[in-house]
Amino acid sequence: LLLTGTPATSRLFDSFNLFQVLRPGLLAANKYEYNARFFDGASSSAALKYPKQLPLLVHRFLMVRRTKRQVMDDLPHRLDEQVDLPLALGHAREAIRAFGAAPLPPDDLARAEGGDADDSAPDSLEAAGVKAKAHRLGLLKAVALSEPESWLHARLRTLATAAADARQRGERPRKLVVFAHHERVMDLLEKTIGERLADAATPASGGGDGESAPWHGVRIDGSHSGVAKNALLDAFRDNDSCLAALLSIKACGTGVDGLQHTADHAVFVELPETYALAHQAAARLHRSGQTQRVLLTWLLACGPPRRGRLLAGADGGDRGG
């Protein structure tokens, strides 16, 4: 079984060394002869001289090749959902109270009444080490999600209810993954998730490990060692009372497998810095082994309330926030 993770070893042009290991001399004596025989140029972008014959020859005599596109075509449907998260001046005030180095003067708060909520607390939060706009925006979103009638509270109530119903049917519950990035944002989210799940009803009695405990979640970020991270991931996967995983985008957005067996919904409170990070984080759930349709929710900051939008097959859209 040959596993390759980069285009440099998965394209036919660059695969001669793999072919040579399996059947030495079958296609050519060396790489230069192979390239001259089957390609119109000396670069990886060169066109195949025999676009049908070479793949057939490789499949028949060397290996069964599965490209990423073929794997993706076999996965369950993925739905990307954009949900607008209204932010207000009160969220900025709460962020200042929780994290600001000093209270913002009343005249500064008054000037912010007609402006963007994210711009109402730059000085106080920056003095406390919250310098990046993305960091401030993440704090405001986490504050908004901590409110009793927030989108996250409603989702956690639904999650606990569905888990209790699954337990009564003798089934394992489907779980929720929440992605964020900044430590203080994760602190607020961890508190909200823990309190909301603890307030939900205790799971019904029956077989299973840890099922008599209240619903709860786990948090994994860059402070955890590899051993600790794996132990927490195992707890999330195996313990039916553990319904939510709060994960750092950079610590768990790549190189983590197993989430697809227990979760089919991921929420991005903070947006990844690049498309590559977003794609990799989404692939923690939408990957081989997933049997359910995958829902990815991207929480986008906005002013006045607006309806969320559903985008099938999108990757978060082009909006900021």
Image (cartoon, rainbow, N blue to C red):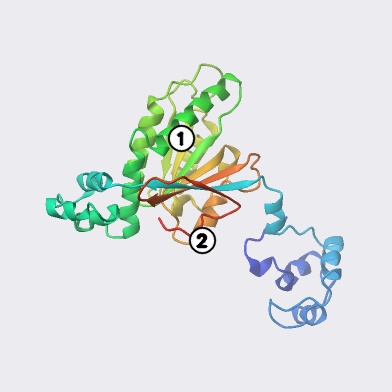
Q: Residue at x 60, y 39 (%)?
A: 261
Judging by the rendered image, the residue that carries numbered circle 1 is 155
Residue at 52% x, 35% y: name it.
175
Query: Which residue is drawn at the image coordinates 63% and 39% (left, top)?
Result: 292
Whether residue 222 appears in this view of the structure is no
For mark 2, give the secondary structure. Answer: helix
Amino acid type, label 1: Arg
Name the foreground residue: 138 vs 300: 300
Instruction: Tell me where residue 270 appears, x and y as whole percent.
Output: 41, 51
Which of the 4 quarters of the picture holds residue 213? top left
**Which quarter shows the C terminus?**
bottom left
CA gap between label 2 and label 1 equals 26 Å
**Residue sticking out furthest to the top:** 205
The mark nearer the N terminus, 2 or 1, is 1
Q: Position of residue 250 (x, y in %)?
A: 45, 54
17 w.r.t. 141: above or below: below
**Between 260 and 9, which is closer to the camera in this rendering?**
260
SS at mark 1?
Answer: helix
Of 123 and 289, nearer the camera is 123
Around disc 2, counting alpha carbons within 10 Å, would you say few (fewer than 14), some (14 to 19), or many (20 or more)?
few
* Vertical arrangement, residue 200 with respect to residue 29, above or below: above
Q: What amino acid is found at the position of numbered circle 2 in the picture?
A: Tyr
Disc ID at residue 125? none
Report if residue 59 is visible in the image.
yes
Up the image or down, 20 lies above or below 34; here it is above
Are the two marked residues, 2 and 1, in contact with CB atoms closer than 8 angstroms? no
Judging by the rendered image, the residue that carries numbered circle 2 is 275
Question: x and y percent of residue 268 in the render?
Answer: 46, 48
Q: Nearer the viewer, mark 2 or mark 1?
A: 1
